[in-house]
């Protein structure tokens, strides 16, 4: 298939780009360069309805994620703040998920990535279901009819590293983290380009799908020269199954209108007293 061949061609280009990035001496410049590489190589293989940026993600209850390397968000209905800047603020309702980018996934970098992912997965947002036809339209069904209540808007979170811990060591460390963390806040997939492996959640829902969060352990497999193509296909598979639910503008409108009304009432009251 030509599509898969195109993805395999990207893999060889990616390796060369990462080697070039080592020429940068400043660590921040290295990181920015690597993030740019991934964005430029991911972009051609993602539909235009998906956009990518970097920054923090916010929820309506006031919580904020840590700084995220690559945020994948809705490019049609989303309301991203400060689009004209390098770092953005993303309402969590507009976010599909994120990718943590690491040139070398050491134990310390793994913990940082896990903390970043957890900071996103902890953000609360209203569940979407099969009745959410689009982010702005919810289908109301008649009396006596039922539909699945399965949550269709989990955050999909990945870690991509150029190099890193061995497959066995990383799987062991991830499974150890399951005893210390909420398993629903752990990454969904990890891909290592140079060591050519991928790690997924295994258990009752082994097949890579974002539906559900229950799993028994992490499972690693050698992906050989198809590591990058597998990451692209996995990402698209998961994104295609997620249905976002837009911000509730009615709530924002009512809150803002009430604030304006209260100020008008207060001003009128002050005039009457004088």
Image: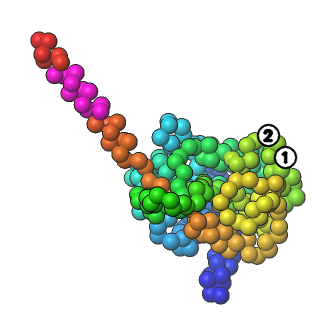
* Corner quadrant of residue 218: bottom right
Q: Quadrant of the C terminus?
A: top left
Q: Which mark is residue 176?
A: 1
Helix, strand or loop status at disc 2: loop
Residue span colored magenta: 258-268
Residue sitting nearer the eye, 33 or 129: 129
Percent across and percent down for residue 177 are: 80, 45
Q: Residues within 10 Å of mark 2 (few under 14, many from 20)?
A: few
Q: Is residue 172 left or right of residue 164?
A: right
- Taking the magenta stretch, the answer to whether it contains residue 260 is yes
Mark 2–mark 1 CB contact (< 8 Å): yes
Query: In the image, what residue occupies the spot 70% across and 53% down?
Result: 213
Percent across and percent down for residue 15 are: 69, 70
Q: Which residue is mark 2?
A: 180
Query: In the image, what residue occupies the spot 74% across and 47% down?
Result: 183
Percent across and percent down for residue 127 are: 54, 51
Work out whether residue 9 can be spotted. no
Residue furthest out toward the bottom: 1
Q: Residues within 10 Å of mark 1 (few under 14, many from 20)?
A: few
């Amino acid at each position: 298939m030509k599509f898969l061949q195109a993805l395999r061609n990207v893999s060889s280009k990616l390796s060369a780009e990462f080697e070039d990035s080592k020429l940068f001496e400043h660590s921040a410049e290295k990181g920015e360069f690597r993030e740019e590489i991934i964005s430029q190589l991911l972009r051609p293989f993602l539909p235009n309805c998906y956009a990518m940026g970097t920054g923090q993600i916010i929820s309506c209850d006031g919580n904020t994620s840590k700084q995220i390397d690559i945020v994948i968000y809705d490019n049609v209905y989303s309301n991203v703040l400060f689009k004209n800047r390098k770092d953005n603020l993303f309402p969590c309702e507009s976010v599909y998920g994120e990718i943590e980018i690491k040139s070398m996934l050491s134990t310390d970098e793994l913990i940082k990535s896990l903390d970043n992912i957890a900071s996103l997965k902890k953000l609360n947002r209203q569940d979407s279901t099969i009745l959410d036809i689009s982010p702005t339209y919810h289908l109301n069904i008649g009396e006596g009819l039922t539909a699945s209540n399965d949550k269709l808007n989990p955050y999909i979170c990945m870690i991509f590293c150029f190099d890193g811990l061995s497959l066995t060591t990383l799987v062991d460390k991830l499974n150890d983290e399951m005893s210390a963390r909420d398993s629903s806040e752990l990454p969904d997939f990890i891909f290592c380009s140079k060591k050519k492996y991928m790690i997924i959640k295994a258990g009752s829902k082994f097949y890579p799908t974002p539906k559900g969060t229950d799993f028994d352990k992490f499972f690693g497999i050698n992906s050989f020269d198809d590591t990058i193509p597998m990451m692209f296909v996995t990402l698209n598979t998961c994104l295609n199954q997620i249905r976002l639910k837009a911000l509730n503008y009615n709530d924002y409108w009512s809150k803002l209108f009430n604030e304006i009304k209260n100020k008008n009432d207060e001003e009128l009251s002050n005039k009457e007293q004088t």
